[in-house]
Image (tube, rainbow, N blue to C red):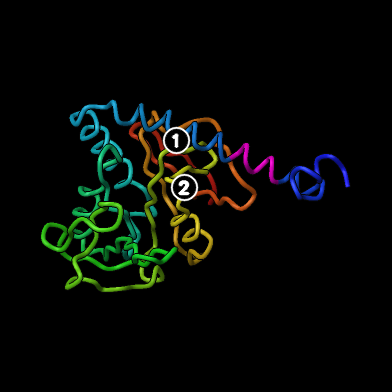
Amino acid sequence: MSTREHYTGLKYPDWIESLTEAKTAVEKEQFRRYILRLRDRQSTRDIDQKSVEILDQVLHLHEYVRARGIACYVSKGSEVDTRPLIRKALDSNKRVLVPVVKKGDIDLFFSEIKDLGKELAPGSFNIPEPRPEFLRPESLDAVDVMFIPGIVWDKEGYRLGWGRGYFDRILKTLPEHVRSIGLSFNLQLVSRVPRDQFDLPANTVVTESRVVRCHS
């Protein structure tokens, strides 16, 4: 047994892989903290204005225009504000599904909403979710576009979220016809994020000034 194997309890290739994964995890956390500080420094006015500009970009995307329905996270804090997007979709008679976290479960499910104003309340992680009486679980087969949250994005569509893996698991099982779109402020977009071999990219990233086509 080598010295490294003696101290780590891992065979040499496993030891290298473990070290690489640990390094990537540290880099991801550093990226999250740095970009979150920048995002949180924005004024409410800046967030609102940039969110309107992002919405305008989204409304002109052919994926959105043609979509029968969308799946969209409900924003909180300093995230890109998705409420105007959800209202526009509902007003256009598109179906709208929002994510729900079931306590004790590692996976999201999606529920259809019909009234943004009265159907939501703070849920898991204080993220707005449908009240129990308005839960309408639905498959993502019912939509054509899914909008994804993220803390850091890169120009190839890879993202860093909060590290819980909810949307990573969704991307792995996303129906083939559904296009995934990340919503991001310019300040959240970097040239490359640290990534693992199992991370999957979004098809497109939209900021207040550009539409980045990543993977069609």
Give amino acid for label 1: Arg
* SS under mark 1: helix
> Identity of the amino acid at label 2?
Gly
In this view, 81 is above or below 66 = above
Rendered location of residue 57, percent (x, y):
32, 41
Residue lying furthest right in this view?
Answer: 1
Residue at 21% of width from left, 55% of height from top?
A: 122
Is disc 2 placed on a helix, strand or loop? loop
Labels 2 and 1 touching (C-beta < 8 A) = yes
Number of marks in picture: 2
Q: Which residues are magenta?
A: 18-24
Give the Cα distance between marks 2 and 1.
9 Å
Other-residue count near label 1 (Cα within 10 Å), few / some / many at <14 / 14–19 / ≥20: many
On the image, the x and y values in percent for residue 98 come to 30, 61
Q: Which mark is residue 58?
A: none
Question: Looking at the rendering, which quadrant does residue 93 occupy?
Answer: bottom left
Residue 20 forms part of the magenta stretch: yes
Q: Which residue is mark 2?
A: 163
Residue 52 vs residue 173, the one in the foreground: 173
Per the image, the residue denoted by label 1 is: 32
